Image (tube, coloured by chain):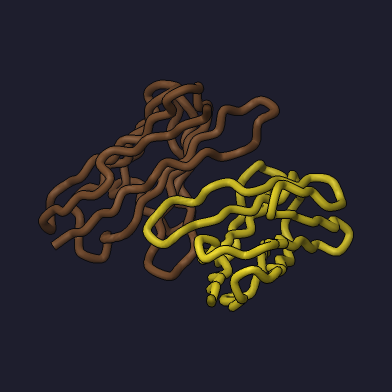
Amino acid sequence: GQNIDQPTEMTATEGAIVQINCTYQTSGFNGLFWYQQHAGEAPTFLSYNVLDGLEEKGRFSSFLSRSKGYSYLLLKELQMKDSASYLCAVMDSNYQLIWGAGTKLIIKP
Amino acid sequence: GAVVSQHPSWVICKSGTSVKIECRSLDFQATTMFWYRQFPKQSLMLMATSNEGSKATYEQGVEKDKFLINHASLTLSTLTVTSAHPEDSSFYICSAREGGSDFEQYFGPGTRLTVT
């Protein structure tokens, strides 16, 4: 079966760095997405990785290792507004998105 | 660019009635649209995938006669929840994909449905 695993909840301090991990087992791979979702709102796109390595975009970076079925989202200089759920999703061989359950990130002052 | 709208943003209806939710891609043509449902504190659950001009493909466990999906044009898809019940109360989110080499799904803002 297809499976995406990510931690249920994480807590970090304002100004610090946090890494949210995602491991996956899917039928085929056409890229991995990270989305941010604030409570009561729809997800917003953060990043897309299809090749191994690190993609940096401002305070957010995303890493992918296809051989390990592993990705992480790195958030630097955390701000209170970064408190949200972070969803990892993998596009399988049918170009369907397989979603993880999301990681709720709590930022404390 | 790549804006998706949903209407209404929230709706309250009585049990047994039907509710229609619209999803529009405002500045691109969406060859594929997706409908998701999300219950509180849970992840997105894909309900169905629709391609313009063809019948929607429903995920296992989703009743196609209860959740009617129409994708009549490249910019509009509708989801009709028929004979709604309180257990259908949820956050319904659509997303759209332009297709070709663009695999990203652009999400609408969601519709919160409450059935009383």
A50 with respect to A8 (left or right): right
Q: Is residue B60 above or below residue A80?
A: above
B42 with respect to B105 (left or right): left
Residue at (27%, 42%) from the top-left corner?
Answer: B80
- Give the drawing colour for chain A: yellow
Q: Is residue A86 above or below residue A34?
A: below
Q: Which chain is brown?
A: B
Residue at (59%, 78%) from the top-left corner?
Answer: A11
Foreground of the two, A92 or B92: B92
Residue at (45%, 45%) from the top-left corner?
Answer: B48
Where residue B74 sits: x, y (%)?
45, 22
Residue at (29%, 53%) from the top-left corner?
Answer: B112
Foreground of the two, A45 or B81: A45
Foreground of the two, A9 or A80: A80
Report which quarter residue B23 is drawn in: top left
A99 with respect to B85 (left or right): right
Q: Does the rendering let one see residue B22?
A: yes
Report which quarter residue B100 is drawn in: top right
Number of marks in picture: 0
Foreground of the two, B93 or A107: A107
Where residue B51 sits: x, y (%)?
49, 30
Q: Does the rendering let one see residue A92?
A: no
Locate the N terminus of chain A and report the quarter of the image it occupies: bottom right
Where residue B1 sits: x, y (%)?
52, 27
Where residue A14 sits: x, y (%)?
59, 71
